[in-house]
Image (cartoon, grey):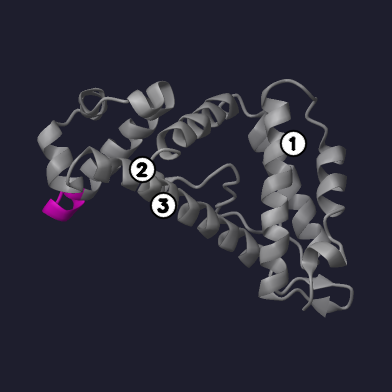
Amino acid sequence: MRLTRAESKAANKRALIEAAREIVGRDGSKAKLEDITELAGLTTGAVYSLFGGKNGLMAAMVDDYVGPLDLRTPETGGFGARLAEVVAEIARRYLHMSADPQAAGRMLFETRVLDLVLNDPDLRRRLNTSIRSTEVELAALLTGREHGGAAVTAQQALRLARALKALLSGLGQSVVLGAHEADEEFFVETALALITPTVLGPA
């Protein structure tokens, strides 16, 4: 079945973004447009047509980046009603992501992305926006959960989400690097230790 023009355009955009991720993951800020288009099986003209040029493609790739804590999944049944249950499940999932053989490649890509954006204010702004959006998505999993006889507010959930991202990212890196073993109990108990009045803040 032939793709419609819109479907073909969307497929080409996705192919270029995925190719950009791979080449940037390999070459960082030295990534060449020609290498990206060759990997995507498209021309440099397609990049200018779809993104306005290399900078536009890099911006789209950064916008597409979800950061070191991607918990987007259709299976939400593992999350319980209480805040502690949700935090424990998030910690378990992140540990499994960190112990995955693909985790080293993801960490290398994250390093290359930082190399790419640190000297480009627009890309840095876009990366910050993308990272904040993942914090909001994570906070959505926490909002309304029961803790201490009350429901966690959106503001409290966002504060906890930020702390969880920072904590689990650091713990996950140590697992990827082989500095520490993938200890589920430690991941869970450390994540649960963040559920304090100081971290949550006022309701």
Label at residue 141? none
The prevailing secondary structure element of the residues shown in magenta is helix
Q: Amino acid at mark 3?
A: Arg
Label at residue 171? 1
Crowding near the residue tagged with mark 1, few <14, some 14–19, many ≥20 C-alpha atoms within 10 Å: many
Secondary element at tag 3: helix
* Screen quadrant of the C terminus: bottom right
The image position of residue 186, as x and y in percent, is 86, 39
Say if 98 sits above or below 48 in the image: above
The image position of residue 62, as x and y in percent, is 40, 45
Q: Is residue 5 magenta?
A: yes
Q: Give the magenta part as a residue range.
A: 2-9
> Which residue does the image show at 87% across and 40% down from the upper left?
185
Determine whether, in the image, residue 159 is placed left or right of residue 44: right
Secondary element at tag 2: helix
> Which residue does the image show at 73% across and 70% down from the upper left?
156
The image position of residue 106, as x and y in percent, is 53, 31
Q: In terms of image quadrants, where is residue 33?
A: top left
Q: Nearer the viewer, mark 2 or mark 3?
A: 3
